[in-house]
Image (cartoon, rainbow, N blue to C red):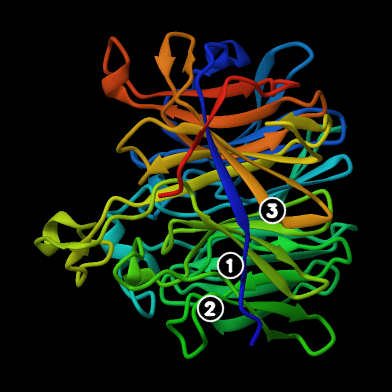
Amino acid sequence: MSKPIRARETRYLYSGRALDSWFHAVPLEYPGHDSIWSLATADDGTIYIGLAGEHNKGTTALLAYSPRTGRTRIAADSAELIGDMRSKGRMPHSKIHFAICPVGRKIWFATHVSGAVNAGDIVGPVGRGPIAHPLTGYEGGRLMCYDSVTGRTEDYGVLVANEGVRCLQMSADGGIAYGITYPKHRFFMHDLSTRETYISGRVGRFGGIDLFMDPRGTVWGTHDGYEGTEPGQFYRFDPARRRLVDVPAFLPRSTSARMSYPEVGAHVLHMTPTPDGQAMVSCYGESRIALFDPRRLCVWDWGTVWEQAPKRRLLPARQFRKNVIPSARLAVKPHFAWCPAFNVFTPRTIAGDRYDRFVWYGEEQWEYERHVRLCAVAYNRRDPGRIVKIRFGTPKNDGFPSGHWAASTVGADGRIYFAERVRGKDTPDHRIRLRLSVFTPPKEIADLTETPMP
């Protein structure tokens, strides 16, 4: 068993006044859509956005934004392609969740479900409930492909019946799709040439939201520890044997009193590829981040997102994620690392030391409870066991403080694009607003004050 290596860490707080000037907003006014869970950059620099009708029982669409012209357009609308399932009395395709994969001129994406019913109706140990109803339930997430040259979208059909697609990875030639289903949380592999689909057993009680594909094309994921495996254990898909293979590498763990959500175990939120073939990993069950090296099967523990999760306190079950985890009776205010994005174009000097790897992320308490804070981790690719962590604060963008960042992508221009949901309580008309929060990383980092570890 390979235990995570604890990194040596130094922390700084940013005290400068330039934070707001690093951001500008691109409003996304598309009625019927209330959230964004997926962003990706194509080879031609176009930013593709997964519009979702998560809370208003809407449908999903693929939006294209051109940084060169500043214009947005609908590239593919699921309701137009396959019909609006609501008119047929069925649950709609309401999301594209971490599931946009550009491969050359083709933009692959998969649909997901969440907007038509309460979460308690579709989350369960075996996926029972209205989602699986043969007449009114969800038909299953579909794989689609938008051709950026012809402007046409092809529907490849349902991947796994009665289950949504939480994340999608495509092989380098666009011939094989990989993902994790919802609500049964199963890994799948779909071969487009033979139309064969491999479906594994469950990879967790609450599953993993994301997968990671290394430069060799190997797909990696983690167990959450609720289906007979160790919590936070990594696995890889073996294409020759068509099975998942557990490996002796594990995510870092807190004591049970300091875990964010022990009920969901080591539930992975993001697995963000680095320029060096590794992955930065953040979790729901833990307020921690880590770096995974698939070649060495090594994990560096980068510690808490920022603040240490407070000790849990008893609360009535109805106050803690009602209908999602009905049996839960413990609640804390965890901090999550949302949508990490790597920027390695310019090495930076911090407190006299030079760093050649820089990853930016949003620090947030749950999804919408507080404003997001911009944070960063700096390290050197030859020494990921020594890091610097910086908290910059909440940027004000176009007059509104930044709300919830659910996805990010690095543009061809070097800027970082965050998908943002501005809270209604922060707008004059109390209306939720969607926008791209466009971040131009500063070339040098100054005005830092060292702060003690929590």
The residues bearing labels 2 and 1 have C-alpha atoms spaced at a distance of 9 Å
- Mark 2 is on which residue type? Val
Q: Earlier in the sequence, mark 3 or mark 1?
A: 1
- Mark carried by residue 137: none
Q: Marks 2 and 1: CB-CB under 8 Å? A: yes
Q: Is residue 325 left or right of residue 22?
A: left
Residue 6 in the image: above or below residue 244: above
In depth, the one of 408 and 195 nearer the eye is: 408
The residues bearing labels 3 and 1 have C-alpha atoms spaced at a distance of 33 Å
In depth, the one of 2 and 90 nearer the eye is: 2
Q: Marks 3 and 1: CB-CB under 8 Å? A: no
To which residue does mark 2 refer?
Answer: 203
Residue 82 visible in the current orientation: yes
> What percent of the width, then of the height, locates residue 3?
61, 78
Q: Marks 2 and 3: CB-CB under 8 Å? A: no
- Picture quarter with the N terminus: bottom right
Q: Earlier in the sequence, mark 2 or mark 1?
A: 1
Q: Nearer the viewer, mark 3 or mark 1?
A: 3
Q: Earlier in the sequence, mark 2 or mark 3?
A: 2
To which residue does mark 1 refer?
Answer: 180
> What percent of the width, then of the height, locates residue 316?
9, 62
Q: At 26% across and 66% down in the image, what residue appears?
A: 325
Q: At 47% across and 91% down in the image, what residue appears?
A: 228
- Mark 1 is on which residue type? Ile
> What percent of the width, then of the height, locates residue 205?
41, 76
Q: Is residue 260 left or right of residue 15?
A: left
Q: Nearer the viewer, mark 2 or mark 3?
A: 3
Q: At 26% across and 56% down in the image, what residue appears?
A: 332
Q: Is residue 59 left or right of residue 432?
A: right
- Mark 3 is on which residue type? Arg
To which residue does mark 3 refer?
Answer: 386
**Helix, strand or loop at disc 2?**
loop
